[in-house]
């Protein structure tokens, strides 16, 4: 377009604007744009009517987000995926797509803290009830499902106590009780490298991409993977109208970069975590260790059946033989292990669930699911395992055990 005879305002925007050209970059460029140009009104109308594929507006889709979502769907063995601005954005956009007042959700009692708050505080305000039951008990799951149950919801490995949910059993029980119920699994802790819930009968898989999939502690994002038909509904209902939790192009670019090393990182996270778990299990100041890779873990066999690539994840929780104050002192004195929530980073992170990630639970509710004030959750990083263990040992040795 020749802008030579146009006004200053027009020229400051349009002058010398390059035509899109076609080099062949190795890395997908960042499509940092809010909207897309239509050739004419007919094309715009056809895209809005979903009759013609193509981009409209970044809240609906963007090439960077699509690349990540399709790649994760591929790794999960699902038909399609949708990247969102956070794990909570993915959870709400997905659940709200098919829910209305009067419906209910049957969920595992042990959940990520904000999912728990969504289920126990936010959804009841909208007329949706949530029945929390222990998902190791098939009878309890079946008994809680009724004609108004829309979803059966759980996490692959629970947060923070690392119980492993038997997705084969849960999906079978759920679908027998109500064939059209949707089994939704939050697979954040295992990543698609260690577990693929769709293969075990789940209908929908969700991740906080913030954690292992991105893996570098610099992005917040979420993803949902399921059939192409359901993804389209989540896109045009749950995400487009209800939450608006779309992914950002720059974040998608970073996730693409991080995901290239997912398998290598997971192998190291798992190897380091197993070493740390074995060390903690042998230390007299440690009451008990939650890690599915230990032979004494109650669902060790379930993990062996469901998990792939010989690993059990990078998160280890452990309870100290001391009170809350001494537990705080222990954490505060660690040097290499860093006090921060989140997980799946190269840096080893440690946190105190009762006062941090799970402060949405009441003290009684925490007791019921077995989380004490002396429990710590550790996301074992990619450092040398011996250095992580030395850091822990130096402080554990100082705890006086009666
Ligand atoms: C972090 C996390 C979430 C929430 O994800 P955000 O990206 O922080 O919104 C959900 N589920 C699990 C298991 C998580 O660890």
Image (spheres, rainbow, N blue to C red):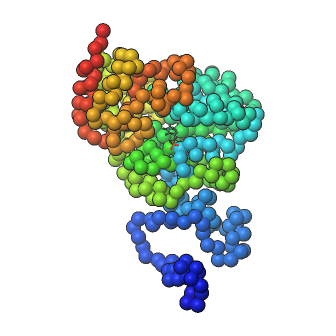
Residue 26 appears anywhere in the view:
yes
Residue 278 drawn above or below residue 217: above
Quarter in which the C terminus is drawn: top left
Residue lying at the far bottom in this picture: please name it. 5
Q: Quadrant of residue 307?
A: top left
Which residue is found at the position 58% from the left and 64% from the top? 34
Q: Position of residue 141 (x, y in %)?
A: 63, 25
Horizontal side, residue 15 vs residue 177: left or right? left
Residue 25 drawn above or below residue 76: below
Seen from the viewer's position, the closer of residues 49 and 38 is 38
Which residue is found at the position 40% from the left and 41% from the top? 344
Residue lying at the far front in this picture: please name it. 8
Q: Position of residue 149 (x, y in %)?
A: 70, 33
Number of numbered discs on residues: 0
Which residue is found at the position 40% from the left and 37% from the top? 340
Which residue is found at the position 59% from the left and 85% from the top? 7
Quarter in which the N terminus is drawn: bottom right
Horizontal side, residue 149 vs residue 319: left or right? right
Seen from the viewer's position, the closer of residues 74 and 261 is 261
Residue 173 appears anywhere in the view:
no
Horizontal side, residue 29 vs residue 235: left or right? left
Residue 211 drawn above or below residue 106: below
Q: Position of residue 154 (x, y in %)?
A: 56, 33
Residue 226 drawn above or below residue 314: below
Q: Position of residue 35 (x, y in %)?
A: 60, 66
Horizontal side, residue 50 vs residue 115: left or right? right
């Amino acid at each position: 377009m020749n802008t030579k005879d146009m006004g200053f305002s027009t020229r400051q925007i349009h002058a010398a604007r390059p035509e899109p050209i076609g080099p062949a970059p190795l890395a997908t460029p960042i499509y940092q744009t809010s909207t897309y140009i239509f050739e004419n009104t007919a094309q715009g109308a056809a895209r809005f009517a979903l009759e013609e594929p193509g981009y409209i507006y970044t809240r609906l889709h963007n090439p960077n987000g699509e690349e990540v979502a399709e790649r994760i769907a591929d790794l999960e063995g699902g038909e399609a995926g949708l990247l969102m601005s956070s794990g909570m954005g993915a959870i709400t956009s997905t659940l709200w797509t098919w829910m209305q007042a009067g419906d209910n959700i049957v969920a595992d009692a042990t959940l990520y803290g904000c999912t728990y708050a969504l289920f126990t505080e936010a959804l009841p305000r909208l007329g949706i009830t949530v029945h929390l039951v222990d998902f190791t008990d098939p009878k309890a799951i079946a008994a809680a499902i009724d004609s108004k149950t829309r979803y059966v919801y759980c996490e692959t490995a629970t947060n923070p106590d690392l119980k492993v949910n038997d997705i084969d059993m849960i999906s079978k029980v759920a679908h027998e009780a109500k064939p059209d119920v949707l089994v939704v699994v939050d697979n954040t802790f295992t990543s698609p490298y260690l577990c693929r819930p769709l293969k075990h009968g789940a209908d929908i898989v969700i991740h906080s991409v913030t954690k292992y999939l991105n893996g570098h502690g610099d992005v917040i994002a979420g993803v949902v993977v399921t059939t192409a038909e359901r993804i389209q509904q989540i896109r045009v209902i749950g995400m487009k109208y209800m939450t608006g939790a779309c992914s950002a192009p720059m974040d998608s670019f970073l996730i693409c970069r991080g995901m290239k090393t997912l398998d290598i990182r997971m192998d190291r996270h798992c190897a380091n975590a197993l070493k740390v778990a074995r060390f903690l299990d042998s230390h007299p100041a440690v009451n008990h260790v939650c890690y599915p890779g230990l032979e004494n873990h109650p669902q060790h066999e379930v993990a062996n059946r469901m998990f792939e690539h010989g690993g059990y994840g990078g998160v280890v929780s452990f309870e100290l033989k001391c009170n809350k104050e001494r537990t705080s002192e222990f954490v505060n004195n660690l040097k290499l292990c860093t006090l921060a929530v989140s997980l799946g980073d190269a840096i080893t992170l440690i946190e105190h669930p009762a006062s941090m990630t799970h402060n949405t639970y009441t003290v009684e509710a925490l007791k019921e699911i077995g989380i004490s004030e002396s429990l710590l959750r550790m996301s074992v990083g990619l450092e040398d395992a011996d250095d992580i263990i030395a850091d822990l040992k130096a402080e554990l040795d100082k705890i006086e055990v009666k």
